[in-house]
Image (spheres, rainbow, N blue to C red):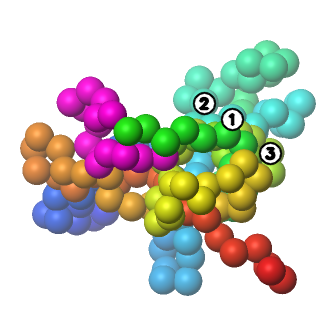
């Protein structure tokens, strides 16, 4: 409850509730929230509210935190402003990221879009997307390139 009040007073909100964890300490980092089927191991993002596995039909999916790091599977650099509902700036890069157990879609950030490459390692960050019609700063999950360890 206090978290909601703090967001209201600061006029900050996520692009969608329940997509990532909120760190409880400065040492923690946010993680995307997914679902995992206990029967077949299929992982989903975003988490499935109904709790039914589309692969095997099993009910009772469990909520899991997804790995923060992955690799770019595919991406596009968008040069044209989309609908009025998109709060970000143009151009922007959007694509698929392969995490260890699931592929997710997200924006890319903190990079030169001309240097993005398929297979490039990336990590999750939560950043401002823009300001909505009600004056709220909207936060979104994005991925930024990282240096490979040992490189």
For mark 3, give the secondary structure. loop
Where does residue 120 sit, x and y in percent of width and height? 72, 58
Q: Nearer the viewer, residue 38 or 91?
A: 91
Q: Nearer the viewer, residue 128 or 27?
A: 128
> Residue beneath label 2, please?
48
What stretch of residues is rendered in magenta? 80-93
Q: Residues within 10 Å of mark 3 (few under 14, many from 20)?
A: some
Q: CA distance from mark 1 to mark 2?
A: 7 Å
* Image quarter in which the C terminus is found: bottom right
Where does residue 25 sit, x and y in percent of width and height? 49, 80
The stretch drawn in magenta includes residue 147: no
Where does residue 89 sit, x and y in percent of width and height? 29, 48
Q: CA distance from mark 3 to mark 2?
A: 15 Å
Q: Residues within 10 Å of mark 1 (few under 14, many from 20)?
A: many
Q: Which mark is residue 106?
A: none
> Residue beneath label 3, please?
101
For mark 1, give the secondary structure. strand
> Residue beneath label 1, please?
44
């Amino acid at each position: 409850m206090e978290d909601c009040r703090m967001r209201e007073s600061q006029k900050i909100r996520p692009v969608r509730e329940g997509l990532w964890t909120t760190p409880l300490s400065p040492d923690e980092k946010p993680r995307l929230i997914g679902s995992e089927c206990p029967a077949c191991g299929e992982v989903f993002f975003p988490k499935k509210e109904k709790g039914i596995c589309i692969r095997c039909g099993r009910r009772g999916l469990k909520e899991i935190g997804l790995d923060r790091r992955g690799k770019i599977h595919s991406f596009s650099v968008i040069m044209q402003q989309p609908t009025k509902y998109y709060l970000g700036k143009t151009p922007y890069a959007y694509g698929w990221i392969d995490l260890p157990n699931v592929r997710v879609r997200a924006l890319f950030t903190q990079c030169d879009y001309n240097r993005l490459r398929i297979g490039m390692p990336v990590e999750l960050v939560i950043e401002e997307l823009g300001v909505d019609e009600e004056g709220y700063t909207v936060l979104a999950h994005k991925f930024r390139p990282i240096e490979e360890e040992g490189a």
